[in-house]
Amino acid sequence: MRFIGQKHPFTKCVAIDVDDTLVINERLNTAVVDYAKERQAAGFEILLWSARGREHAEQIADKFGIRDLFSSIISKPGYIVDDMAWSWTRYTRVVKMTTLVAESSND
């Protein structure tokens, strides 16, 4: 997918945050899980990350039995080293999904 004036297409990689995105009020946000599964089926790499660290993100993925959904689980980057500085973000889209569809049966 390329937009007018864009040098590179969006990559097939989705990075999902844990707190208040994947999990809201200690409940799994099934809308985010469904979105991730759809993207994965379309050939996207799915990453899970958290500002609270990789271990926290892994614990959440394990708690809800969705660890296999993610190709990588990492800490949210504290630093980004890139020749484009912040202009790299023009090759990235933010998808805001804060709607909690249903409680997970894995609570």
Image (cartoon, grey):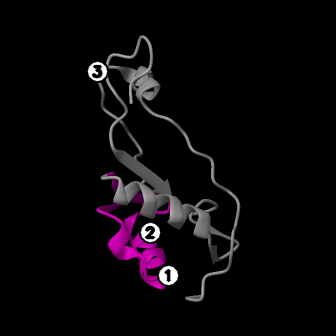
Residue 89 versus residue 107 in the image, above or below: above
Q: Which amino acid type is shown beneath numbered disc 1?
A: Phe
| Residue 91 in sight in this render | yes
Asked which secondary structure carries label 1, the reply is loop
- Residue drawn where x is 67% and y is 80% of the image: 103
Question: Which residue lies under the disc numbered 1?
Answer: 64
Q: Give yes or no for contact between labels 2 and 3 (Cβ–Cβ under 8 Å).
A: no
Question: Which residue lies under the disc numbered 2?
Answer: 57
Q: Is residue 98 left or right of residue 62?
A: right
Residue 41 versus residue 64 in the image, above or below: above
Q: What x and y, as percent, mark residue 19?
A: 59, 63
Asked which secondary structure carries label 2, the reply is helix
Magenta stretch contains residue 100: no
Q: CA distance from mark 1 to mark 2?
A: 11 Å
Q: Residues within 10 Å of mark 2 (few under 14, many from 20)?
A: many
Q: Residues within 10 Å of mark 1 (few under 14, many from 20)?
A: some
Q: Which amino acid type is shown beneath numbered disc 3?
A: Asp
Along the viewing direction, whichever of 62 and 54 lies nearer the viewer: 62
Q: Find the magenta span and give its range.
A: 44-73
Q: CA distance from mark 2 to mark 3?
A: 29 Å
- Residue drawn where x is 48% and y is 55% of the image: 16
- Residue drawn where x is 44% and y is 75% of the image: 61
| Residue 75 in sight in this render | no
Question: Which residue lies under the disc numbered 3?
Answer: 83
Q: CA distance from mark 1 to mark 3?
A: 38 Å
Q: Which amino acid type is shown beneath numbered disc 2?
A: Ala
Asked which secondary structure carries label 3, the reply is loop
Q: Give yes or no for contact between labels 1 and 2 (Cβ–Cβ under 8 Å).
A: no
- Residue drawn where x is 55% and y is 40% of the image: 94
Mark 2 or 3, nearer chain start? 2
